[in-house]
Image: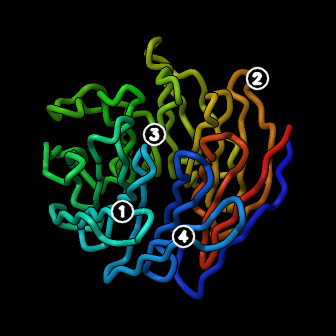
Amino acid sequence: MHASPLWEFKEDSGVAFDEAWSPRSDRLAVAGLDHALHVWSAVSGEKVLTAPYPELLSCVSWSPDGRYLACGSSAGEVVVFDSASAAVVLRAAGHTDEVRSVAYSPDGRYVASGANDRTVRIWSDDLALVTVISAHADLVRSVAWSPDGRIVASGGHDKMVRAWDARTGEARGLLADHQSSITQVAYSPGGDFLASASADSTVRVWDLSARAYALVLDEFDRWWVEGISFSPDGRLLATIDQNGTIRVFHLGKRQVVLNMMAGMLNKTVSWSPDGHCLASGGIGSEQVWALRD
């Protein structure tokens, strides 16, 4: 596999805390730069939307129909923007501290959020509160929906990966083998695997049907693993570590098929839904690479 630079999107200040691809892979939303939500065209490289906000926006997720963008804020809010006009259409203040992760459910009917207040909250698509989950003993860094929309996984600074019934908030599983904070959790597209990245310099891929680890990746030279992203076909897993190195692992072959330096200050990695690009964000910029075999 090879990667070549496609676009670099720059702003004057701030950090690209999170990015999200539109469902059609034609736009990339970035939260954090210049205390705003930005959307760029992945086709032309032009900025198509800027949505300033009084509070820092720390995470972002597209609705499955591409009409809305949900963000979390440093003030504990979940905010929904219209993806065409940049207008704020919904806002909910429920968390008591910074929201670190936000995700639309696969059917778009719900939004999950995880925050520094140690809770995971499930909202309806109009941001009516459905349930509050006292999820972790420390801040919640990441939330992810199972592909069938029934389960929400969360990872926290308490070293735990937990799974919850999305409707009732009841516990549905616990993984406690990491030795440090969880930085991100992600389900594979088919829902067979749950991956977790950690500050313990490992990524663990859990086979949900076998209830055993399918793979433990530890090739990160003692750097924290900051982010992970499955390819749309589920065969590959992209990772980025604290040193800014992106690696793509072929899960079946259990080997690295791409290794490249994104930048020391890049902390995120996201695979486009069409599988053709990887994006990664850092201080003042967001980068996009085109992939080819």
- Residue 242 located left or right of residue 176: right
Q: Residue at x 52, y 66 (%)?
A: 30
Measured Cα–Cα span from mark 3 to mark 1: 28 Å
Residue bearing the label numbered 3: 178
* Mark 1, secondary structure of its residue: strand
- State the mark number for residue 253: 2
Q: Which residue is mark 1?
A: 71
In this view, 182 is above or below 92: above
The residue tagged 4 is: 16
Say which of marks 2 and 1 sits in front.
1
Q: Residue furthest front?
A: 85
Q: In the image, what residue type sits under mark 2?
A: Lys
Tell me the distance, in whole angstroms, between the alpha carbons under discs 2 and 1: 36 Å
Find residue 90 and report its horizontal and vertical position in percent.
Answer: 23, 63
Other residues around mark 4 within 10 Å, as few (<14) / some (14–19) / many (≥20) = many
Q: Earlier in the sequence, mark 2 or mark 3?
A: 3
Viewer-closest of 178 and 290: 290
Find residue 249 and report its image quarter. Answer: top right
- Which of labels 3 and 4 is toward the front? 4
At a point 37% along the width and 55% down the height, the residue shown is: 101
Relative placement, left or right, of 3 versus 8 is: right
Residues at marks 2 and 3, CA–CA distance in whole angstroms: 24 Å
Outermost residue toward the bottom? 12
Task: Look at label 3 and name its amino acid.
Answer: His
Q: Which mark is residue 189?
A: none
Give 278 or 62, whichever is nearer the viewer: 62
